[in-house]
């Protein structure tokens, strides 16, 4: 099958592309390399350095005619979205609409969209949060992801396009950007290995549902079939404190760093954990990598230079 992956030079996208190619698919990547890296793009993929907001998306879809679209390109930094909400909406809302309009016109049958289980629900009332939990995002990023889901549902209703919106928990693993604001595991790991002092935002007692990237790739693949659509949480269902992650990483890296706490981050909720029964029951999907094992693999990757 021919599949277009937006954001295929990024952390999750590059793993998705590798796996799709390994399974014999033809892959086309669109990425503007704003955070992604050209060297992460599998050599067997066709690569277009392009913004998802560009008019040239039309020509690419017309020429390539992919059957499925995996839409991962996004402004994905929560803090950046609080400082630049217009930019966030341009990329995540208008960019998504641009892609969907052209995808529908040029015969794409199925879209898998990376939404956010961490940002869409806002402060949770129920733990873990099922897909029908109230959505009250507390950041522009969460709002723009929710809008992306709504536009997908609109296009699906209006045109017969099939879709899944995957509400990803906190993804971690090799190739995650350790310089930005987004991936706390990548940031802690790099700093500990370089003997720098990491700072824990807030008390460190805030919780996240940390899922290893390979388990997310598998979730994307199993939901690509055209017979299913809808919204699915993708996480582990396990609630882990930032302090727990910090402690395990300290052991794995043999770091002597202190436990230093800073101000809490704006736009982020306190507790986050996803109910993943729906994706388990629908597809038989389940996580394969424990937190300890995933962190070990991540540390090995960053030891190799990242
Ligand atoms: N990493 C997580 O924990 C997590 C959690 C929930 C949802 N998500 C979503 O998963 C997707 C992938 O995230 P990631 O962690 O791999 O981040 P990433 O920053 O590594 O990947 C995003 C990719 O999109 C590209 N991109 C950004 N803006 C673009 C634009 N305007 N046009 C074309 N390409 C553009 C970047 O260059 C990058 O390669 C995003 O949609 C993100 O919102 C990630």
Image (spheres, rainbow, N blue to C red):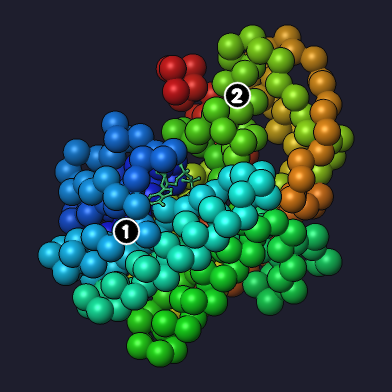
Q: Dividing the picture into quarters, in which one does residue 294 lie?
A: top right
Give the crowd class for mark 1: few <14, some 14-19, many >=20 residues within 10 Å. Answer: few
Q: Dividing the picture into quarters, in which one does residue 251 lie?
A: top right
Dot 2 or dot 1, earlier in sequence? 1
Q: Residue at x 19, y 61 (%)?
A: 60
x and y percentages locating residue 293 in the rendered image: 56, 34
Local SS, label 1? loop
x and y percentages locating residue 283 in the rendered image: 47, 70
Q: Would you name the residue on which mark 2 appears?
A: 189
Q: What numbered label is drawn on residue 54? A: 1
Q: Quadrant of the C terminus?
A: top left
Above or below, 27 against 292 in this view is below
Q: Quadrant of the N terminus?
A: bottom left
Q: Dividing the picture into quarters, in which one does residue 159 lie?
A: bottom left
Q: Which residue is most to the left?
A: 63
**In the image, 129: left or right of 235?**
right
């Amino acid at each position: 099958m021919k599949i277009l992956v937006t954001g295929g030079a990024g952390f999750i996208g590059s793993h998705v592309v590798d796996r799709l190619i390994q399974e014999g698919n033809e892959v086309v990547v669109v990425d503007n390399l704003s955070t992604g890296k050209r060297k992460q793009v599998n050599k067997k993929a066709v690569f277009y350095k392009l913004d998802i907001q560009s008019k040239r998306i039309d020509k690419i879809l017309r020429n390539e005619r992919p059957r499925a679209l995996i839409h991962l390109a996004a402004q994905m930094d929560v803090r950046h979205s609080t400082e630049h909400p217009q930019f966030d909406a341009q990329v995540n809302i208008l960019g998504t609409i641009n892609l969907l309009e052209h995808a529908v016109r040029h015969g794409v049958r199925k879209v898998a969209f990376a939404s956010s289980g961490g940002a869409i629900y806002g402060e949770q009332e129920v733990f873990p949060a099922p897909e029908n939990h109230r959505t009250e995002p507390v950041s522009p990023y969460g709002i723009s992801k929710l809008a992306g889901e709504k536009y997908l549902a609109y296009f699906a209703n209006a045109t017969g396009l099939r879709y899944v919106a995957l509400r990803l928990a906190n993804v971690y693993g090799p190739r995650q950007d350790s310089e930005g604001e987004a991936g706390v595991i990548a940031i802690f790991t790099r700093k500990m290995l370089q003997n720098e002092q990491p700072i824990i935002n807030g008390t460190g007692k805030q919780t996240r549902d940390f899922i290893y990237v390979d388990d997310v790739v598998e979730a994307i693949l199993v939901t690509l079939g055209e017979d299913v659509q809808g919204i699915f949480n993708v996480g582990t269902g396990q609630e882990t404190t930032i302090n727990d992650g910090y402690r395990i990483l300290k052991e794995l890296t043999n770091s002597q760093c202190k436990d230093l706490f800073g101000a809490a981050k704006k736009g982020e909720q306190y507790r986050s954990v996803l109910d993943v029964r729906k994706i388990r029951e629908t597809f038989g999907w389940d996580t394969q990598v424990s937190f300890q094992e995933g962190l070990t693999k991540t540390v090995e990757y960053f030891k190799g230079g990242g």
